[in-house]
Image: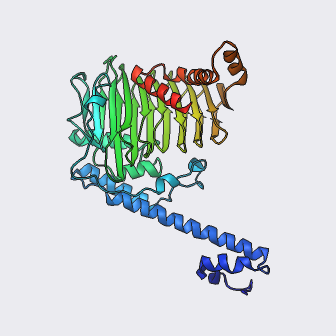
Amino acid sequence: MIKLQTNISTFISTPDIFFREHLLKKKSFSKRSGLIYQKLVSCSKTQNKQDDCKEWLDSILSVRYPTKKEYLDKWRKVAINLIKGMPFPSKTDESWRLTSLNKVYGMRFSKEENDNNVFDLEDQLNKYRGPKIVFVNGVYSEKFSDLSNLNEKLILDELGNFPDKHIDNILEFLSKGESGINGGFFPTLNIACLSGIYVLSIPPQLQMDTPINVIYVGSNQSSAIALNHRLVIISGSDSKSKIIEHHISKNQPEYFDNTAISILVKENSTLDFFLVNESSGNSIFINSIHAEIKEFSRFNFSSISIGGLFSRVNLGIDINGTDCECNVKGISVANNNQTTDFHSRISHNLPNSQSSQLQKMLLTDEAHGVFAGKIQVQHGAGNTNSDQLCKTLLLSSSSRIDALPILEINNENVKCTHGSTVSDLDKNQLFYLQSRGIPESEAKKLLTIGFVNEMINDYGEEIKSKITKKLEFLM
C-alpha cells in the first residue's frame, strides 16, 4: 500500500487505471487519499482541457488565409501575439462563468474546399427586400450581392481602399469596446484571422426608408470551417437608416462563425440595427458588437436568435453624448440542447440620456439560456433614465436559465430599474382559453406566440413566419 507520506509526484506519475482498479477497491484507502485522488483527477482533466483548447486554437490558426494588405497584416500580427498570451475563456472568468464552452472547443477545422461548394442562393436571397450585401464563407460575394437599390451616396468598400488617414482613424475606432482588440479573446481571435474589413458609411443628412440587408452565409462544406467577419458601420450626422444583419445556412453544415461589428452613430442621427441569427443547428455563433453614440442621436438594437448549437451575443454600447436615446430588445428561442447567451453593457458616460432593454428567452427540452446585462451610469452622467428587464418562459422542466441583471450607478439624480422573471405557461390563462373551447395544445401555442409577438413586430413577414414555424415545432 502507498503511504500518505509518499511524494506527490508519485501520484502524478501513477496511471489512472491503477487508482481505479486497485486503490479504490481497498478498504484501507483513507478518505484523505480519496480526496487526493479526486484532486489529481481534476488536475488531469484541467490539463486535458487546456490541451484541447490549444489544439482548437492551433486548428483555427492553421486555416487562416494569407493577406497582402499591409495594414491588415500588421493588425493580424498584433492580435496573434495577444491571443497566444491570453488564457482561454472558461468558467473561471467572470464573463463566461455561466456558460460552458465545451461545444466550442470540441471543433476542429479545415480550409474551405477548392471547388467552393456553395449551395444555390438565388431563391433564398430573393426573399430579402432591398439592397443585399452578401458574404459567403467569410468572403464578400459580388455575385450574390445586389447593390442596384443601394443609394449611390452610400459607401461600401474594403478598408484597404480608403486613404491612409482614414484607415488609421477607423482602425483606432475598431480597437474600442467589446468588438475591439481589447474586447476579449474572441474579437482578438477575429482580428488574428481576418482576410478583410468592410466599411458601410451612410453619408450625412441621408434619410433611408429601405433596409440594407447584410447577409452572412455558411456553405455546404464536408468539414468544419472557421468564418471571421468584420464590419464597420458609420451613421453620418443627421441621417436615418435601417440595417439588418442576417446569419443563414442550409443543410445544417458545421462551422464557427466569429463576427465582430463596430458601429458609430454620429450627431443627431438615427440607426435601427437588427440582428437575425438563423445559423446552422451544428454551428457555433459568436457575435461581438460595439456601438458608440454621439450627441442627440438614437440607436435602436433588436435581435432574434433561433439558430446555432451554441450562440452568444456580446453587446457593448457607449453613450458618449447628451440627449441620446438607446433601446435594446431581443428574443432567443432554443430547444434540444442548444445554448443561447446574451451579454450586454450599456454605459451612460454623459448626462441627459435614456436607455431601455427588454430581453426575452423561450426555452424547452434541455436548452440553456444565459442573460447578463449591465447598465452603467458613470460620474457626471446625471439625469439618466434607464430600465432593464429579462423575461424567460420555460416550456420544460429540464430547460434552465441563468439571468444576471446588473446596475452600476456612480451618480445621483438618476432613475434606473432592472429585473428578471422566470415562469412557465400561466395555468389560469390556459384554463381561461380552454374554458372558451380552445384545445389545450392550441391554447399553449397562442400563449407562446403572445409572449414573442411584441419582440418581432418590427421585422418583415418572412422572419415572422420563420419564428412562428419554430414555435409550432416546439409545441
Give the number of callouts: 0
Q: Give the residue displayed 29% in from the left and 39% down from the top.
A: 135
Residue 318 position, x and y percent, is 49, 34
Against 129, residue 332 (above or below) is below
Q: Which residue is nearer to you in this view: 105 or 349?
A: 105
Against 61, residue 409 (above or below) is above
Against 1, residue 38 (above or below) is above
Q: Which residue is nearer to you in this view: 367 or 52?
A: 367
Residue 398 position, x and y percent, is 65, 42
Q: Give the residue displayed 64% in from the left and 32% down from the top.
A: 411
**7 to the left or right of 459:** right
**295 to the left or right of 22:** left
Q: Give the residue displayed 39% in from the left and 38% down from the top.
A: 261
Residue 471 position, x and y percent, is 52, 29
Q: Which quadrant is home to the C terminus? A: top right
Q: Which residue is nearer to you in this view: 181 or 66?
A: 66
Is any atom of residue 268 visible in this view?
no
